[in-house]
Image: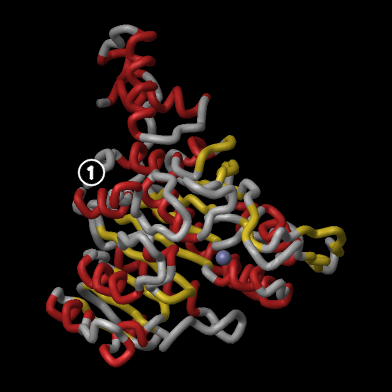
């Protein structure tokens, strides 16, 4: 295993485009053949791939390069959290059936390593249900969870636990959420859990209670929460927009990390700045600016934790770009940007990838979005996908 990890590491550093686990195995086999029998002694004296204990996958929904640069400029000087990442790359976001992905197929690529059709969540051809890196982390005894600024049933958070052929199957997703085993889940969407708002009339909150979850409805209760599993449904529907939302994203993220980090076997979590996408759909530059400032604040807190911890890999990327944003002008000294939007939909552009912590350099270069979870799995020694 050591030799395989070493060889694959060499390979990944050079060629970053991997589309499937089968492809990865083939490449490892070829390297094995090319290099012959490496002795244990040689392996021990070489640089072995680092093995982070924790991973925090951060998604800026709809966050392309222009959105990131607008944030860098607005933060003034060298204050942007994006400037703290030592490694950067790009991700190709197209889905299985479209040049422009939606968040369901984009999220699926980032959590499972599979390209699927738009609107599908961890759901492939012939009703294949793809396992996520969070499933693998859970199977390895790690803690898992997510914090989002959308409903907990939105496509991106759903890609950490759900399996549906259509992203708006909220009744089904809420039942899958109740069964998924995440330790910490934070977002909006309380109404979807109430029987009077459901077609099936079921009570997923009862299932959650039986499974030992505490369900809280306010940030205060979340902050006071001290043990076991927690679902925080902070809003009836979608969370407020920034800046009206206040410091929810950074505080919830810090609290979730503190809870998850209690597990000595480590944790895997997703954090999403969900509404960068919504601001761009609305072509609303003030809304976008506020969401990016909120995202920056969370990023700084996560980086602070990762640097203190030393065993945490942080990967920041987007599922796709939204709005066709461009920045024809601005003022560096004042931190202002002239933000223009092409339209109110997603685009097919590559999106940036930022990485920090053990193994971060493997995320450099231009990579398929599907390579991101594969690299995380490999770096953390998580089992290959157990698709069913
Ligand atoms: Zn969108």
Question: In the rendered image of this protein, does residue 156 appear above or below residue 136?
Answer: below
Q: Residue at 33% across / 71% down in the picture?
A: 185
In the foreground, 54 or 122: 122
What residue sits 39% from the left and 64% below the top?
A: 166
Placement of 10 over or under 107, stated as above or below: above
Q: Quadrant of residue 230?
A: bottom left
Q: Position of residue 99 (x, y in %)?
A: 58, 48
Note whether residue 271 is visible: yes
Vertical arrangement, residue 96 with respect to residue 66, above or below: above
Ligand 1 position by quadrant: bottom right
> Could you tell me which secondary element the residue under label 1 belongs to?
loop
33 left or right, relative to 68:
left
Above-or-below relation of 18 to 233 = above
Q: Position of residue 357 (x, y in %)?
A: 46, 45
Asked if one can make out residue 308 in the rendered structure from this viewpoint, the answer is no
Q: Is residue 8 left or right of residue 346?
A: left
In the rendered image, residue 205, in percent from the top left (x then y), is placed at: 22, 82
Residue 267, picture quadrant: bottom left
> Callout 1: 10 Å neighbours few (<14), some, many (20+)?
few
Residue shown at 29%/83% (left/top)? 199
Q: Residue at x 34, y 54 (%)?
A: 123
Count numbered badges in the picture.
Answer: 1
Quadrant (top left/top right/bottom left/bottom right) for the N terminus: top left
Where is mark 1, residue-wise? 386
* Most distant residue in the front direction: 126
């Amino acid at each position: 295993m050591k030799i395989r990890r070493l060889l694959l590491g060499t390979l990944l550093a050079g060629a970053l485009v991997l589309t499937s686990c089968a492809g990865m195995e083939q490449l490892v086999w070829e390297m094995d053949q090319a290099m012959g029998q490496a002795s244990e002694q040689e392996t021990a004296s070489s640089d072995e791939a680092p093995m982070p204990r924790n991973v925090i996958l951060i998604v800026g929904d709809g966050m392309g390069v222009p959105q990131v640069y607008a944030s860098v400029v607005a933060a003034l000087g060298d204050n942007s959290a994006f400037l703290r990442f030592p490694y950067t790359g790009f991700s190709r976001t197209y889905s299985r059936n479209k040049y422009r992905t939606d968040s369901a197929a984009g999220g699926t690529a980032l959590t499972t390593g599979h390209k699927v059709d738009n609107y599908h969540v961890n759901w492939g051809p012939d009703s294949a249900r793809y396992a996520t890196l969070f499933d693998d982390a859970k199977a390895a005894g790690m803690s898992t969870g997510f914090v989002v600024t959308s409903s907990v049933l939105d496509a991106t958070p759903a890609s950490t636990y759900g399996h549906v052929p259509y992203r708006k199957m909220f009744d089904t997703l809420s039942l899958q959420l109740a069964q998924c085993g995440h330790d910490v889940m934070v977002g909006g969407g309380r109404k979807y859990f109430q029987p009077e708002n459901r077609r099936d009339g079921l009570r997923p909150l009862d299932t959650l209670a039986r499974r030992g979850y505490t369900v809280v409805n306010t940030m205060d209760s979340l902050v006071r929460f001290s043990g076991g599993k927690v679902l925080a449904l902070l809003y009836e529907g979608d969370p407020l927009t920034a800046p009206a939302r206040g410091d929810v994203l950074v505080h919830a993220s810090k609290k979730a990390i503190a809870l998850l980090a209690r597990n000595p076997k480590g944790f895997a979590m997703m954090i999403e700045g969900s509404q960068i996408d919504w601001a761009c759909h609305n072509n609303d530059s003030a809304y976008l600016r506020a969401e990016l400032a909120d995202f920056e604040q969370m990023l700084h807190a996560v980086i602070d934790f990762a640097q203190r911890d030393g065993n945490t890999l942080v990967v920041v990327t987007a599922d796709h770009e939204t709005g066709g944003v461009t920045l024809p002008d601005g003022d560096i000294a004042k931190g202002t940007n002239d933000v223009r939007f092409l339209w109110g939909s997603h685009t097919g552009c590559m999106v940036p990838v930022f990485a920090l912590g053990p193994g971060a350099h493997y995320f450099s270069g231009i990579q398929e979005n599907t390579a991101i979870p594969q690299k995380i799995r490999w770096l953390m020694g998580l089992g290959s996908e157990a698709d069913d």
